Image (cartoon, helix red, strand yellow):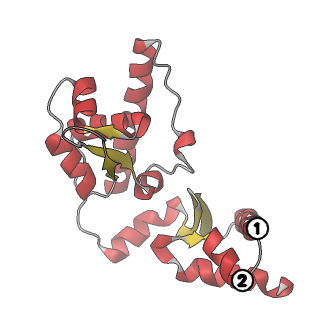
Amino acid sequence: MEQDLTGIVETILYISGDEGLDTLRLAESLETNQSRIVSELKRLQQEYEEHGETLQIVQVGETFKLTTRPEFSLYVEKYAKPPERSVLSQAALESLAIVAYRQPVTRLDVEEVRGVKADRALHTLVNRGLIEEAGRVKGAGRAILYQTTTRFLDVFHLESLESLPKIDESASDEGEEQMDLFLTNYKEQLDDEKD
């Protein structure tokens, strides 16, 4: 299997599509260890980069995906003619940032930080697949807890939540600046995708 590992990994990576290749699942099916699969994926990722391949391998959380390079995204979009994307409102972006940095959180937690109702913004984020329910608070009311999704990591090109820009909450002005930067970068990314 040693000589075939590259071919197996590339094939599974190709057929895994948007879901991505789950390294643990592949390791179990090949009866090998996960670190061997991850190592091969990292080697392939570097090889694709060095050879300037038109496709790239990206890591999103615990999965790896085969994607087009960003410089070709315009052509892919034109060819596929996706429906026009609607930009998230400022309220939704602020709520998303709060969930991302403080998760898991309840609607009341988000409202406490924002100072206004967050029902609609959270509903939009759930519908867009950027956040999801993460259980319920114990006790009276059993409020829903929210957390970000793998799609959130994918949209923001983050390997993990640890890749989020750091916010110093003790220096509130600086923390707000970091959160504003996070939101601004997302808006710019959406604008670039629409152009």
Please name whichever residue, 25 or 57, is drawn nearer the observer in this view of the structure: 25
Q: Taking 80 as reference, is 115 above or below it?
A: above
Looking at the rendering, which quadrant does residue 94 occupy?
A: top left
Near-viewer residue (99 or 83): 99
Give the position of the N terminus as an image quadrant: bottom right
Q: Which residue is mark 1?
A: 47
* Pointers 1 and 2 in contact (C-beta within 8 Å): no
- Name the quadrant of the C terminus: bottom left
Question: Which of the pair 23/70 is nearer the observer?
Answer: 23
In the picture, the disc for residue 30 is: 2
Q: In terms of secondary structure, where does tag 2 sit? A: helix
Judged from this view, the residue extending furthest toward the front is: 139
Mark sitting on residue 11: none
* Residue 45 drawn at (x, y percent): 70, 65
Looking at the image, residue 15 lies above or below residue 178: below
Residue 78, by quadrant, is bottom left
The crowding category of the residue bearing disc 2, from other C-alpha atoms within 10 Å (few below 14, some 14 to 19, many at least 20), is some
The foreground one among 86 and 111 is 111
Q: Where on the picture, by quarter, is residue 67?
A: bottom right
